[in-house]
Amino acid sequence: MIYPFNAAEAFKIAVTIEDNGLKFYRDAAKRFAPSPASVVFDALAHEEEGHKAYFQSLLDALPKDGPPTAFDPENQMDQYLQMMAGMHIFQKDPAKVDKVLEAVKSEKDAIELAIAFEKDSVMFFVQLKEASAGMGDRVSVDKLIAEEARHLRILAREYNRLFGSAK
């Protein structure tokens, strides 16, 4: 069964994804220091902190007593959302982020993985927008998508600067 989503649910997932992105970028910066890529990863970690705070502020600004978007007497919606977040490149478990980074052999691989992460994030949030119940939710999710798309542009620009044109 497909459930409609609201902005609060999307922002909860966004905070989890940003937490894991932050961990990845911090760890990648340490792993590849000193290098031009480590500088990029440090900057992206800072961006992730800002994204997380932004998404948390959007979540905090939403009405706390809004009607649910789906009948969910057994709290299955939250379980479903967590499962969806777990399918993202940077899953909920930070230890899995470590495993993903361990498999990365070069700075170029790490930036390519980060690009894939950001693309996954944009696509994930576009799908959440499509599933959002109300127009107000869609506008809020649009803000989230714009932030992730900006991050993707930063990564693409840095990839091109460090390694030439994108693959």
Image (cartoon, rainbow, N blue to C red):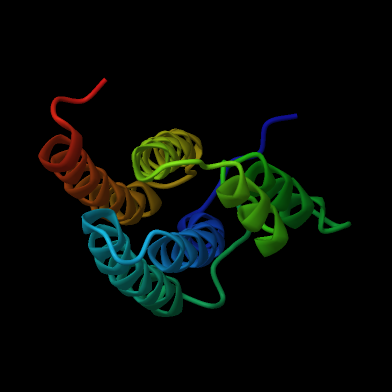
Query: Which residue is most to the top?
Result: 167
Residue at point 50%, 41% (across, down): 105
Percent position (x, y) of residue 116?
A: 42, 35
In the image shown, does 20 or 136 lie closer to the viewer? 20
In this picture, residue 93 sits left or right of residue 66: right
**Rendered position, 129 above or below 2:** below
**Rendered position, 159 above or below 61:** above
In the image shown, does 124 or 24 lie closer to the viewer? 24
Q: Quadrant of the N terminus?
A: top right
Query: Which residue is most to the front?
Result: 34
Q: In which quarter of the image is the C terminus?
A: top left
Percent position (x, y) of residue 13?
A: 55, 57
Residue at point 82%, 58% (across, down): 75
Percent position (x, y) of residue 43?
A: 24, 67
In the image shown, does 94 or 1 lie closer to the viewer? 94
**Rendered position, 84 above or below 123:** below
Residue at point 59%, 63% (across, down): 67
Number of numbered callouts drawn: 0
Query: Which residue is most to the right?
Result: 74
Percent position (x, y) of residue 138?
A: 35, 46
In which quadrant of the rendered view does residue 113 lie? top left
Residue at point 18%, 49% (across, down): 154
In this picture, residue 134 sits left or right of residue 76: left
